[in-house]
Image (spheres, grey):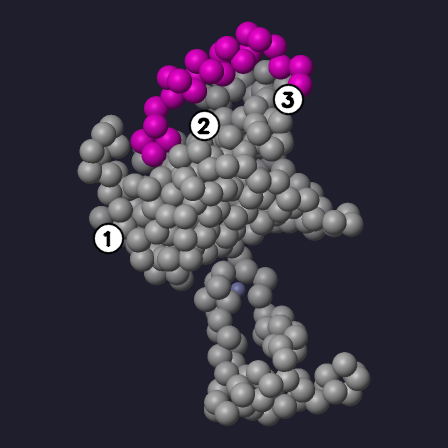
């Protein structure tokens, strides 16, 4: 089954609910980045939140999410567009931490691995003049709580965020998905109370996903069984890197650096997001230098 997202309105149009299944794209990230289970959890949750948040926007608008909590995973970076495409990586892929005590004993210690001494930052490229960046302090490092806090503190939108990634015994992704529910102005007190109650009584998302619940089921539950579907969007891990982009990147380097690279038979550049590699020969590098000299720069 392919990954997709569902968007619906509920409570007389005063609440919007997004729910997504992201198993394939999270497992793709695990595979290309060789992620260990806690890294899969952390990046998987961020990719899921990112691809849902990306769908809030339109046309060629894009967002970049940075999470840096000072934990062993290092930075997490996720890019998403408005069309269900997402890409991302975590600085240290080989992290596996398990909580050994408390009510989370035995489960992946995502909060510990991310750390809480830092921030969640969203940069929006809305294709109008400048970028917009907003930042919120990390709350637990468990990602869902951090997004909930981010939406409330930085965007003034009361929200509920649920993110779930279940890693199988062979370290592949068994299921992944999530939801974001947002309260808009005009939402009645009785609706708010009902939503609060539903979220409180909701089974853990991991369990719902394992039981085969689909995005429609999650929206239906959160809407108290009455919602208007708005659209369905296919989701995928996709990177827009190209050899040409890396070539332009090389062209910004000081000439001395390029000359030094020409000592190597082949210069290999790697995309951090998708691990694609692009190679350049000394002749390629010489051409880059020549082109630049001709431009008079
Ligand atoms: Zn790439």
Q: Residue at x 79, y 84 (%)?
A: 296
Image x and y of residue 167, in percent: 30, 46
Q: Is residue 215 magenta?
A: no
- Label 3 near ligand 1 (CB < 8 Å): no
Q: Secondary structure at mark 2?
A: helix
Image x and y of residue 106, in percent: 21, 38
Image x and y of residue 36, in percent: 30, 54
Q: Residue furthest top?
A: 190
Tag 2 and tag 3, C-beta contact below 8 Å? no
Q: Residue at x 54, y 34 (%)?
A: 150
Q: Is residue 265 visible?
A: yes
Q: Check disc 3 and report the residue beneath it.
A: 184
Question: Which dot marks residue 170?
Answer: 1
Q: Earlier in the sequence, mark 2 or mark 3?
A: 3
Tag 2 and tag 1, C-beta contact below 8 Å? no
Q: Residue at x 54, y 47 (%)?
A: 65
Q: Earlier in the sequence, mark 2 or mark 1?
A: 1
Front in this rendered view, residue 165 or 97: 97
**Numbered range of the magenta stretch:** 185-208
Q: Residue at x 41, y 48 (%)?
A: 70
Q: Secondary structure at mark 3?
A: loop
Q: Check disc 2 and report the residue beneath it.
A: 218
Front in this rendered view, residue 290 or 284: 290
Q: Main SS of the magenta segment? A: helix
Front in this rendered view, residue 195 or 289: 289
Question: Which dot marks residue 280?
Answer: none
């Amino acid at each position: 089954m392919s990954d997709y997202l569902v968007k619906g309105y509920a409570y007389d149009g005063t609440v919007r609910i997004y729910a997504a299944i992201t198993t394939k794209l999270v497992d793709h990230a695990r595979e290309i980045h060789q992620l260990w289970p806690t890294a899969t959890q952390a990046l998987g949750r961020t990719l899921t939140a990112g691809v849902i948040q990306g769908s809030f926007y339109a046309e060629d608008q894009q967002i970049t999410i940075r999470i840096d909590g000072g934990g062993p995973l290092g930075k997490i970076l996720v890019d998403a567009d408005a069309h269900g495409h997402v890409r991302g990586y975590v600085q240290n892929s080989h992290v596996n931490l398990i909580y050994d005590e408390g009510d989370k004993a035995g489960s992946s210690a995502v909060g510990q691995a991310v750390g809480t001494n830092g921030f969640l930052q969203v940069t929006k490229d809305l294709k109008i003049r400048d970028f917009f960046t907003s930042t919120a302090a990390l709350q637990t490092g468990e990602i869902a709580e951090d997004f909930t806090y981010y939406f409330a503190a930085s965007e003034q939108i009361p929200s509920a965020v649920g993110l779930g990634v279940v890693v199988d015994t062979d370290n592949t992704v068994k299921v992944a998905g999530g939801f974001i529910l947002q309260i808009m102005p005009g939402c009645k007190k009785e609706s708010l109370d009902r939503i609060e109650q539903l979220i409180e009584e909701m089974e853990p998302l991991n369990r719902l996903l394992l039981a085969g619940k689909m995005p429609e089921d999650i929206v239906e539950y959160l809407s108290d069984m009455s919602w208007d579907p708005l659209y369905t969007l296919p989701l995928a891990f996709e990177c827009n890197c190209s050899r040409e982009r890396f070539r332009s990147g090389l062209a910004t380097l000081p000439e001395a650096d390029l000359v030094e690279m020409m000592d190597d038979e082949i210069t290999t550049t790697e995309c951090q997001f998708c691990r694609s590699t692009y190679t350049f020969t000394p002749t390629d590098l010489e051409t880059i230098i020549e082109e630049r000299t001709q431009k008079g720069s």
